[in-house]
Image (cartoon, rainbow, N blue to C red):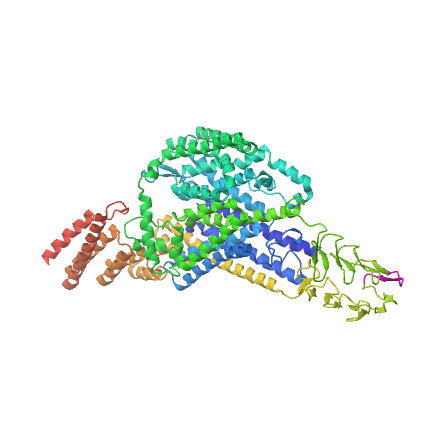
Amino acid sequence: MWRFKKDWSLESSIAYICGGLVIAAGVGACLLRGLFFTDEMYPFLTLWFVLCCACSLYYLVGVGAWRKSGGGVGAVRGFTGVNGVSEVSEVSQVSGENRALRILLSVPLIILSLYVIHWLCGPLSSQGTMNEMLRWGLYASFAILVCFCAVNLVERRILNVTWSMLGMTLCLSALLAVCGVVKLPFAVAYSNSSEVSATGVRLAGLMEYPNAFGAVMAVFLLERLFAVAVYYGDPKKSANMLGARSVGLGMECADAERRSRGEEGVEAEQGKAGSTTAALLRLLPLFPYTAALLLTESRGAWLTAACACAAVLLWKRQLIAPLLAAGAAPVAAAALLYRQLARAGLAVEPVPGLLLLAGLWAGALLAGLWLCRRQRGAAGTARAAMLALAAAGWTAAGIAVLLHVRERITGPSSTVSARGLFYRDAWRLAAEAPWLGRGGETWRHSYLAAQSRPYVGSQVHNGYLDILLNLGFVGLAAILLMLLAVGWLLATKSPRLLPPFLVIVLHSVVDFDWSYGLFWLLLFWLPAIALAEHKQKHQSASTHPQSETKLPTHSTSTNPLTNVTTPANPLIAHSTSTNPLINVTTPANPLIVQSTSTNPLTNVTTPANPLIAHSTSTNPLTNVTTPANPLIVHSTSTNRLTNVSTPANPLIAHSTSTNPLTNVTTPANPLIAHSTSANPLTNVTTPANPLIAHSTSTNPLTNVTTPVNPLIVYPTSKNPPQIRLRRLIGTAACCFSLMLGVLSFHAAQGEKFYRQAIMSVDPSVKVELLQQSLGWNPRSPRTAIALSRLLSGEQSVSLLRQSLLYSPENASLSWELAEVWMSSDHPGAALYWIGQSLRLDKYNNAKWVKAIEGMLLMGQKKLAEGNRKEGLICVASGNELLLKYRRLAEEEANKGGQHNDREFRMTEQADDLSRRLSMFALRF
């Protein structure tokens, strides 16, 4: 009993640790701006990987303790449920669910491995590849954690509550920032371009980017909207949904409570689920999610949400009516709020703003509740009237919003055409390394060299192209396979979660959503929720006899080959199996106390469990009473009719007794390992002791090998393959977590010293801090550039060359080297690095002008020193650079100024340099 409690404590402790890490990920996503900037994620990642390493060590210690103790249930069963019953799978079966889960959990590890390979082989940017390694280490571990929580009964509550709290935190913080209650500096994005915003202001929330924030709000809105639609579309089914998860807050009731309540509990729960409070809680998040989505003015988020809804509703047409009723009032109220706040430029006083928000929210709740209940309860004309009213609400809201932003939707869009430029340039860049890509953050570090126009865009605005640039077609194929597995899981386990999943998949085509870690967390969260709901429904069905899936009570199955009748559930007390060939009735569960088996040939009644103290078997023909427990010393049994004799000492190894009537040979000591009894009539070999681990019975007619005691889980001293595999996985997880934790700690220390150096005004202190930063993280190019500007020429060149080993095509590092050589007497080296830098950043006015001026000054200096030849070479090089600059500027001017975001043209300073070079050429 103590061992079982210890094992259960191990499993429950790991479950709570996993739940705590899921909560930590949600909190980090809110506080760290959606996990976009890797530089500010380093401390969080360090703590995360340390906790993952500790969890892995704890798991390994628990498995080791299980092995030393000789076995147990909870420590080795992996993802388990209550009372030792497995919940993850119908474990040994290779089903579609298991394959999809394997793909879901293995693809992040494959992506992480690809980044590790790039990092070891020399990528385009070592710093960027390290950042992606840390990110995918987070994603892979998070996927494992949420899947563990999904199949663990206790942690499902944490999983669902954290999802709901994350969505409401992101939403309400943005709305309260608009009302002036919460101070968020970048919660509202301003723009002077009518193509970017119809009103000049857009809601960005904690993510500080309206398009990404709009997509996140669409994900949470559709998840809740379809949950309400499913509930009101099938009230009988929805009444079985557990606790407040079905009411919108993501909680679940304990399975033990449901068992104890029985049929009356189900009816009480149905009454609770149908109460007004529960119904209001279901509808509670719809209005704020819709209002936040509209205030972002994200056309991509609106369009993808509409497409996702349409795709699923075409498949599940029965959800159209309840979805119209559930969303009409919240959408209409949110549209009214959007018009009011947009007219004021998202600048309202706190008290009027809060009153407007609260009033519309309350009205949307009450109206939505009334529509949903009338739509579900009405029939015929009344139901049609309710649906018409709901459709009118949707139509009015759509017209109010579209009239306000019609110019952005119907007119030409520079942002759409700019994305077309990004995609064309990205395809050309991807063709340079099509199979494995060029490592992490390829576009960010190479777009200046790849761009065909002088646009500003360090993000490619397409998640799939970003993966293609980083990891090539191999990485992209792995991601697409994972998305297919997630889609299959959602479609088969919980179709209502398909719309939010489709929003993530579709919106990432037109924006850089996948640069936010939050989107990957949501992507792994959705299948975990679907799996949790499926497991909970399965448990609920097996718990209540009134549900669709019932536990068989005294039901039996018959094998026609052996004519053996076996109960469907061997755990049911007093259920028996009968073999008519030998006419023996045997209890299905030999562990049940006082169950007996009767052989009419010998008229012997024997207890099914020979370990029960003082139980006896009596043969009325011979009047012999035999102890049922063979451990009793000196006990003997004699049957004169059957001529069966049993040794007086049953502890003698391999001693046997033979019954000539049935020709059954039985070992005298059934506790001897691997001892068996053979029945020639049925040709079945059965172990004498059903409690022996790994003991099995074999029927050659059906060729079926069955364990005698299905409740025993590996109670052997040997190390089975499952335990070795678990220990191997735990060890690998611990090592990878430790490695990534050390890496993120070094990066965090480097970032800390870099920030301190930037804030310092003392040059000597700044040099010391930058050297410490570079010592912790030598891969950072900006730290090397900042330090090189404070060092002498030779030290600066050595430092920059060392940094180029980590970022071989960094335009800033090349330009720093060019400036160092231009300030010296090495025109050849200066001209080489000028060419390298301009090749990597050709649409940079400042570099062209400074390069031309630098070569002119070097030529004048050489001529003043009397070195006419080198002086003229420098002047000629400057003149050649000027001609290239002029030609490139004229080509860009002929293309128009629509995408000339960097304002690349011939500047007045360049024209002045042209006159100086002309005069200099006339003199010499």
Q: Is 893 situated left or right of 20 in this image?
A: left
Q: Which image quarter: residue 832?
A: bottom left
Give the left or right position of residue 877, taking residue 286 as reference: left
Q: Which residues are magenta?
A: 619-629
User: Image check: 862 left or right of 377?
Assistant: left
The foreground one among 620 and 41 is: 620
Where does the image place residue 292, in percent across and percent down from the top left? 44, 37
Is 696 located above or below residue 848 in the figure?
A: below
The residue nearer to you, when weighing 294 against 495, is: 495
Q: Position of residue 721 (x, y in %)?
A: 60, 64
Marker count (numbered): 0
**Residue 885 left/right relative to 249:** left
Residue 594 among those drawn in magenta: no
Give percent across and percent down for residue 371: 52, 31
- Compared with 675, 62 (above or below) is above
Q: Nearer the viewer, residue 865 or 133?
A: 133
Occupied quadrant, residue 263: top right
Q: Quadrant of the C terminus?
A: bottom left
Can residue 12 be seen here? The reply is yes
Q: Percent x, y for residue 441? A: 38, 55
Q: Residue furthest front?
A: 560
- Residue 623 inside the magenta-drawn segment: yes
Q: Is residue 208 visible?
A: no
Q: Is 345 situated above or below 136?
A: above
Question: Which part of the image, by quadrant, shows the N terminus?
Answer: bottom right
Give the residue displayed 58% in from the left and 45% down from the top.
157
